[in-house]
Amino acid sequence: MPRHETHRRDASGWLLRFTRAERSIHHVTALLMLACLLTAALLYLPMLSTLVGRRELVKTVHVWCGFALPVPIVLGLLSRAFRADLSRLNRFAPHDWEWLRRGDRRAVRDGRGILPVGKFNAGQKLNAAFTAGAILVMLGTGEIMTFPGPWGDRWRTGATFVHDWLFLLIAVVTAGHLWEALRDRDALAGMLTGRVGRDWAARHHADWAERAGRTRADRAGTGTTAEAGPEFAERRPDMS
């Protein structure tokens, strides 16, 4: 992109999507999840377990990363921006059901998505719900497997069964999440830098982009920061 175009976009073509606190929570959680999946694969798959001689060390790393998974999320509740996004992820609107039903959900008309998608689409909301539930189930079953003393044979057998099969499902969902992220460079840049282009936002999250634009205009006119509806709140990039 030419230098003068970059400057124009920096002035008016970017929208704040994620604060520094939100990005940190996502990155730390993602690293812990990937560490759990990698160490689980080394422990679970015979063809990989033979490549690593220090099985007890791998098991220790797996256990500690597993128990640490909810920590960044719990700490993230201190962030107002993170709490606001949790509220958005937990709210299914009528257009979310339509987004799931329609085959042309990503269609664009006049540079704007045909569905009034908010900050998160229905797929992202379902992925977040699955991830949160999976972490809780893996924590519970992992606790039974790590500290089997108080639990009977049926509990231990059931926990092992659920833990192993849920690991495979999480691996598939995580691979799909990474595939989608790598396919959309603008969305990936938004999670890395916190900003996205207004044109990308209008195509993929039309309602959020519109609310963001109105909030920016209100700030320019009044010098105040106002809530622009349930899907967007204007914030400084360094505000948590």
Image: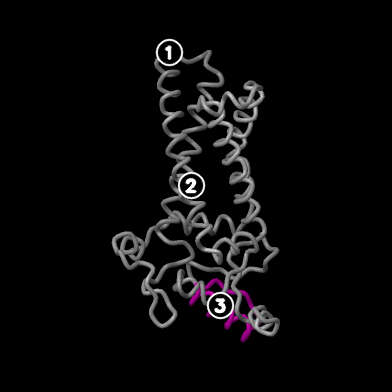
Q: How many numbered circles are shown? A: 3
Front residue of this view, candidates 217 and 107: 107
Q: Which residue is mark 3?
A: 215
Residue 165, quarter of the rendered image:
top left
Percent coordinates x, y for residue 148 in the rendering: 52, 16
Q: How many other residues sit within 10 Å of disc 1, few (<14), some (14-19) or many (≥20)?
A: few
Q: Earlier in the sequence, mark 2 or mark 3?
A: 2
- For badge 2, the amino acid type reads Ala
Taking the spot 49% from the left edge, 65% from the top edge, the residue there is: 119
Q: Write the residue at 45% across / 56% down.
A: 124
Q: How is the image coloured?
A: one colour
Label 2: element kind: helix
Residue 94: where, in percent of width, then height? 33, 64
Where disc 3 sits, the SS reads helix
Q: Is residue 225 above or below residue 39?
A: below
Q: Amino acid at mark 1?
A: Asp
Q: Which residue is identified by label 1?
A: 153
Q: Nearer the viewer, residue 218 or 53?
A: 53
